[in-house]
Image (spheres, rainbow, N blue to C red):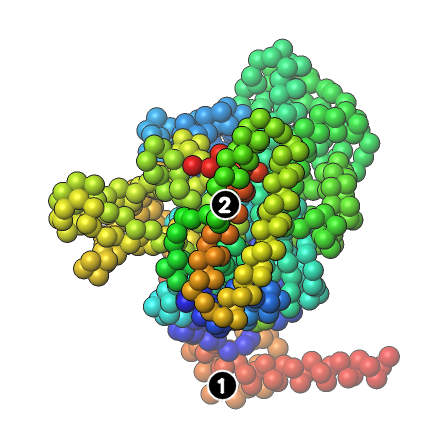
């Protein structure tokens, strides 16, 4: 997986952010186009390509959600399923948000926190087992997370 | 006199200069052994057309601005990379006229001539280039030029065009607040999070940076490319115009008023009150006293406009006010006490002002030039793109490809296909901005994918790569994934000059610039020749001359004659070579004279 490789890492869902930053800085010092300002044109072009991939990789891997989305995409996991039982709950939530106000939104934020805790343990489970079924679970949790986030931000989900 | 060197390898060895191309003033700097150094005086960013029909820039142009406002242009940076309709409201405040044929490219009328904003900037850049060449004693062909962090793609492209027209290869555009951070951070090796608040003549920028072991990582940037000291000036001029009966002042009076209000504004940074006192061309006198309190009340809305972008930048950077370790002030308008107190209140920190706010950006540009040349190692700038980049999709909606505050260079790829059987072309509309709809974003360019292999609808697979380079400028390339061949992309910029137009302008001006440089070098060579010729004539009266053997004297006479023959050559190398020959021929003479002088001096000490 290109983004992990760009930072010299094996694919993983839990990353040490301080280590990630150090890797990013070190690679930037080597690859940044500033280092090739007086180099031949093709070397300049290569530096531009490699450092733009590095920057995009760091930006993607820094945040747990975008990191997981990337890993799932690369692994070909693309379902739109939600966790079992959540759909019924979702209809109620929709209505509550439409009629209600701040109290409902507060409740949603609480749910987001709960989801993030669940994601963290699912991330750990995948890092240990690399199991395909865990990835499917993570996919469903992320779908649920996006659903609730949309509700919090006031967009009704499609 | 030293030995003369002809350096044919000058291309590699020549200095990369750093240029602060400001709305009001510009400056050039370069690295030397001790650090960045300003080369020569401040150059006002003003261009004038002389009575002889020549364009001049800088201080001379500024004096013409008062006498002949219709033949002068200032603050042209505010018009860079913009269309005629775009600037209509703004230009009403300036005494410029837009030329008739400005539909495609904005042109300004200057006397009986027209200039595009990049050409105006190029004249200022050329002035700076000459100043740098004089100061360094060698040709300058490469530069780092600063731009407001919040400049969009078209404004950046226009700045690069200006460099090309001035005969400068712009190796890098650097954001002004980031340059300021480089100037501050270079010798201090700071760690932590800093905010750079940059309020100049025409633009406002705020940048939040993280400093770590010589890496300057920009976390977020925000700003307003039309907010600065000019707005304060225009406000005061408007009040004066109202006081004078609400009639727009004649151009000459406008300049007098502008001059007077700028002076009052500057005085109010140091004094509790100032007086505006102008005698108009019809003999009327306009007098008005302004206290600092009144002034601050007037400009408060302008200062407040800077706070929104500051808060947005903090939010995007993901830091709180408490996490900001230091605040740096940049730009002449940060001398205003109200601006300083607004910054102090917002960031709850005493802002840094150790470096001259007028010079700090140019110094930082020189540091970046040093990074590119390799003179400065261990320091690296990681900047961001200020605005999101997207493409038009169905229903006039913008689909974002690269988000604002992404570290640059950055890239995004997107696949396109055809919607009709046998379709050969696909048009991609690229926009910059944060809004959802095409009409609310800024159109950058239309890219046309041409000569696509004719296949049934939906079967074509064209991968388009959007790259924002380290200058913050967009590059687009495309590949047909089915055939693997590179796809032709034709660019139609929405604003600004086409490549051909820039080329034509370069041809017009670069040759002039080279001529000018050669002419100056020739002049300098003649000055040196004059110098040694005069010394030799003087030496003929001395005892030392009489003591010389005949062969030496003949040799000197020969060298003098040869130098006189070379003197009117246009080639400075020829003059300098003969000067050096004469220098060699007079070695013994010079030694003799020195000895005589020393003997004289020794004699003198004994007597006393």
Choose between B607 and B70: the one closer to the eye.
B70
Choose between B313 and A43: the one closer to the eye.
B313
The residue that label 1 is drawn on is B552
Give x and y (percent) for residue B154: 42, 43
Vertical arrangement, residue B105 with respect to residue B479, above or below? above
Is residue A55 visible in the rendered image? The answer is: no
What chain letter is assigned to the residue under label 1?
Answer: B
| Residue occupying the point 40% across, 31% down | B439
Q: How far is mark 2 from mark 1, CA to CA?
A: 109 Å
Give x and y (percent) for residue A42: 34, 68
Is residue A139 visible in the rendered image? The answer is: yes
Give x and y (percent) for residue B506: 34, 50
How crowded pointer 2 is (Cα within 10 Å; few <14, some 14-19, many 20+) is rated as few
| Residue occupying the point 80% across, 80% down | B604
How crowded pointer 1 is (Cα within 10 Å; few <14, some 14-19, many 20+) is rated as some
Give the residue at the far top of this rendering.
B245
Q: Which mark is residue B592?
A: none
Q: Quadrant of residue B296?
A: top right
């Amino acid at each position: 997986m290109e983004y992990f490789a760009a930072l010299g890492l094996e694919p993983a869902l839990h990353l040490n952010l301080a280590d990630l930053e150090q890797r990013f800085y070190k690679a930037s010092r080597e690859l940044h186009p500033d280092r090739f300002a007086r180099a031949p044109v093709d070397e300049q072009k290569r530096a531009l390509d490699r450092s733009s991939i590095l920057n995009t990789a760091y930006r993607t891997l820094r945040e747990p959600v975008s990191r997981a989305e990337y890993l799932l995409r690369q692994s070909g996991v693309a379902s739109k399923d939600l966790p079992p039982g959540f759909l019924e709950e979702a209809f109620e939530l929709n209505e509550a948000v439409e009629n209600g106000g701040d109290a409902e939104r507060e409740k949603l934020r609480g749910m987001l926190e709960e989801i993030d805790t669940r994601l963290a343990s699912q991330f750990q489970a995948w890092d240990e087992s690399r199991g395909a079924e865990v990835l499917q679970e993570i996919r469903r949790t992320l779908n649920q997370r996006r659903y609730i986030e949309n509700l919090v931000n006031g967009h009704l989900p499609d | 006199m030293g030995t003369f060197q002809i350096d044919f390898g000058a291309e590699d060895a020549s200095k990369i200069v750093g240029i602060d191309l400001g709305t009001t003033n510009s400056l050039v700097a370069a690295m030397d052994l001790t650090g960045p150094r300003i080369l020569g005086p401040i150059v006002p960013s003003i261009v004038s057309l002389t009575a002889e029909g020549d364009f001049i820039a800088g201080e001379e142009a500024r004096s013409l601005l008062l006498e002949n406002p219709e033949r002068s242009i200032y603050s042209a940076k505010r018009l860079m990379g913009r269309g005629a309709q775009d600037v209509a409201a703004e230009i009403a405040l300036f005494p410029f006229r837009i030329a008739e044929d400005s539909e495609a490219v904005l042109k300004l009328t200057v006397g009986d001539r027209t200039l595009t904003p990049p050409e105006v900037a190029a004249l200022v850049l050329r002035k700076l280039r000459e100043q740098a060449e004089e100061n360094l004693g060698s040709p300058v062909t490469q530069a780092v030029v600063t731009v407001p962090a919040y400049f969009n793609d078209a404004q950046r492209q226009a700045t690069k065009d200006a460099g090309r027209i001035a005969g400068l290869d712009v190796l890098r555009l650097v954001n002004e607040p980031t340059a300021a951070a480089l100037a501050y951070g270079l010798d201090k090796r700071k760690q932590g999070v800093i905010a750079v608040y940059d309020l100049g003549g025409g633009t406002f920028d705020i940048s939040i940076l993280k400093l770590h072991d010589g890496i300057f990582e920009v976390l977020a940037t925000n700003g307003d490319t039309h907010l600065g000291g000019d707005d304060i000036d225009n406000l005061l001029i408007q009040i004066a115009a109202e006081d004078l009966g609400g009639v727009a002042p004649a151009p000459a009076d406008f300049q007098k008023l502008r001059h007077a209000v700028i002076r009052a504004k500057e005085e109010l940074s140091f004094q509790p009150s100032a007086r505006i006192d102008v005698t108009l061309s019809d003999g009327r006198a306009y007098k008005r006293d302004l206290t600092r309190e009144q002034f601050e009340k007037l400009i408060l809305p302008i200062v407040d406009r800077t706070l929104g972008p500051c808060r947005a930048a903090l939010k995007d950077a993901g830091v709180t006010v408490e996490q900001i370790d230091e605040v740096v002030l940049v730009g002449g308008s940060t001398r205003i006490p109200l601006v300083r107190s607004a910054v102090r209140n917002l960031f709850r920190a005493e802002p840094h002002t150790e470096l001259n706010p007028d010079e700090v950006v140019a110094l930082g540009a020189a540091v970046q030039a040093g990074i590119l040349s390799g003179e400065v190692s261990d320091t690296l700038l990681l900047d961001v793109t200020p605005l999101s980049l997207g493409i038009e999709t169905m229903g006039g909606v913008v689909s974002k490809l690269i988000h604002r505050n992404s570290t640059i260079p950055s890239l995004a790829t997107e696949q396109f296909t055809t919607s009709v059987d046998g379709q050969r072309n696909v048009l991609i509309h690229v926009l910059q901005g944060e809004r959802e709809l095409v009409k609310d974003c800024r159109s950058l360019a239309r890219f046309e994918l041409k000569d696509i292999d004719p296949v049934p609808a939906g079967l074509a697979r064209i991968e388009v790569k959007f790259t924002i380079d380290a200058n913050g400028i967009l590059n687009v390339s495309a590949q047909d994934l089915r055939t693997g061949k590179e796809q032709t992309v034709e660019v139609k910029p929405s604003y600004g000059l086409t490549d051909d137009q820039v080329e034509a302008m370069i041809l017009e001006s670069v040759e002039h610039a080279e001529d000018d440089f050669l002419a100056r070098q020739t002049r300098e060579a003649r000055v040196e020749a004059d110098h040694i010729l005069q010394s030799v004539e003087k030496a003929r009266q001395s005892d030392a001359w009489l003591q010389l053997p005949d062969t030496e004297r003949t040799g000197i006479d020969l060298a003098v004659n040869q130098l006189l023959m070379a003197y009117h050559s246009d080639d400075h190398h020829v003059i300098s070579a003969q000067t050096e020959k004469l220098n060699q021929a007079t070695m013994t003479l010079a030694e003799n004279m020195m000895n005589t002088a020393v003997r004289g001096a020794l004699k003198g000490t004994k007597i006393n």
